Image: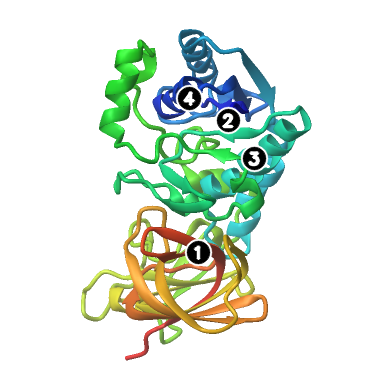
């Protein structure tokens, strides 16, 4: 069946090969690059980002090699509202957001897909490493590149109009294929970090937008052990850059355990105090029929984090998750993705994480 396919082309090797494979499959493919910054010079340059002028040019050159039409769509305003402002507000609320996950949810599989459907396209194609089999989202075969975690926020309706041509291939093979096809970005480095923070200084980026907000850093007994310029600059599990004035009695390193925007307090403690066994998550998105009662599965708490066995109990619009073994560095605002083997069951946003008490 021939589809009209809109291929999202970031300027990297993955999206270029995905577009080429969609064209090889006989689909009517059009390439589009999303301009996500009103001032592309302010986003990363080189090969670390995916939102620069050079990325746009790389995408256009790849489309020329593939032999497909190519356009640039301006989604800068939508990106700023749904991703950048969300990033800032989440940190201000003491949570730890994932902007790449939010970009997938709000830009690639909402704004882009909605516009594609309105223009008569049947599907959107991306270079994500994941598999879609009979409507079921599964992990990509390359465990090191699997991106099912960041796609788990998509709804079944969005996935029904999506193509992921790379899910059955390793990244090394994709690079070799791009070279064979004559696609110039075959050896281009993958994008890293947050594309809209030009210098990689997240703390400085947030301070510029939220201003200085001095407050205390305390230990688990409530003793003041340091000061900060803004609680928003810290994340749960952070060890470096704490600038504590009082060393721990046992001389061991201390980590951020909790961030309270209400009291503007950062709490630090020993590494083992980061252990979490119970999680409450909200706003679940199910990729199949929602479960009627408690069930067992595996969960992943970071894009490339380890997998934990657990028991899940749906509770209205929330999920109560009990891990069989403790996890560390779990923070409100992160996504929890539920798996049955390599199959994605759904996702939710972490609201609370209960530490293991000694």
Which picture quadrant has residue 72?
top right
Q: Position of residue 108 (x, y in %)?
A: 61, 39
Q: Nearer the viewer, mark 1 or mark 4?
A: 4
Q: Which of marks 4 and 3 is in front?
A: 4
- Spatial distance from mark 2 to mark 4, Cα to Cα? 9 Å
Residue with the mark numbered 2: 1
**Are dots 1 and 4 in contact, CB under 8 Å?**
no
- The answer to which of 147 and 329 lies nearer the viewer is 147
Give the side of residue 191 with respect to residue 29, left or right: left
| Residue that carries the numbered disc 3 in the rendered image | 107
Residue 265: image tag: none
Q: Which residue lies furthest to the right in this view?
A: 118
* Viewer can see residue 294: yes
Q: Position of residue 49 (x, y in %)?
A: 46, 31
Mark toward the start of the polypeptide (1 vs 2): 2
Task: Identify the image's colour scheme: rainbow, by chain, secondary structure or one colour.
Answer: rainbow
Q: Does label 2 or label 3 sit earlier along the sequence?
A: 2
Label 3 Cα crowd, 10 Å radius (few <14 / some 14-19 / many 20+) = many
Q: Which residue is drawn at 51% across and 56% down?
A: 233
In space, the residues marked 4 and 3 are separated at their CA atoms by 26 Å
Mark identifier at residue 25: 4
**Measured Cα–Cα span from mark 1 to mark 4:** 28 Å
What x and y, as percent, mark residue 256?
Answer: 40, 68
Residue 211 visible in image: no
User: Does the CB distance between marks 2 and 4 fall below 8 Å?
Assistant: no
Q: Is mark 1 on a helix, strand or loop?
A: strand
């Amino acid at each position: 069946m021939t589809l009209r396919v809109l291929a999202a082309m970031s300027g990297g090797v993955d999206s270029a090969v995905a577009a080429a494979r969609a064209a090889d499959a006989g689909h009517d493919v059009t390439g589009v690059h999303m301009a996500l910054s009103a001032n592309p010079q302010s986003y990363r340059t080189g090969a670390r980002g995916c939102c620069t002028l050079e990325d746009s040019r790389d995408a256009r050159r790849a489309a020329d090699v593939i032999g497909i039409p190519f356009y640039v769509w301006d989604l800068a305003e939508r990106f700023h509202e749904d991703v950048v402002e969300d990033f800032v507000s989440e940190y201000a609320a003491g949570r730890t957001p994932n902007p790449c996950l939010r970009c997938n949810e709000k830009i690639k599989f909402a704004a882009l897909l909605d516009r594609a459907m309105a223009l008569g396209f049947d599907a959107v194609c991306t270079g994500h490493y994941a598999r879609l089999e009979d409507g079921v989202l599964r992990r990509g075969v390359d465990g090191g590149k699997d991106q099912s975690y960041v796609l788990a926020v998509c709804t079944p309706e969005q996935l029904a109009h999506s193509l992921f041509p790379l899910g059955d291939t390793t990244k090394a093979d994709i690079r070799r294929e791009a070279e064979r096809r004559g696609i110039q970005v075959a050896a281009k480095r993958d994008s890293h970090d947050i594309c809209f923070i030009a210098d990689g200084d997240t703390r400085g980026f947030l301070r510029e937008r939220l201003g200085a907000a001095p407050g205390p850093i305390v230990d688990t007994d409530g003793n003041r052990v340091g000061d900060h310029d803004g609680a928003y600059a810290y994340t749960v599990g952070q060890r470096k850059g704490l600038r504590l004035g009082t060393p721990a009695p046992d001389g061991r390193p201390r980590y951020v355990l909790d961030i309270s925007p209400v009291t503007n307090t950062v709490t630090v403690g020993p590494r083992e105090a980061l252990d979490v066994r119970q999680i409450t998550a909200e706003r679940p998105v199910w990729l199949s029929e929602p479960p009627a009662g408690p069930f067992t599965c595996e969960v992943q708490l970071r894009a490339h984090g380890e997998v934990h066995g657990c028991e899940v109990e749906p509770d209205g619009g929330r999920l109560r998750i009990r891990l069989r073994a403790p996890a560390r560095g779990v923070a409100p605002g992160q996504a929890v993705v539920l798996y049955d083997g390599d199959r994605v069951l759904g996702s939710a946003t972490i609201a609370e994480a209960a530490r293991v008490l000694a």
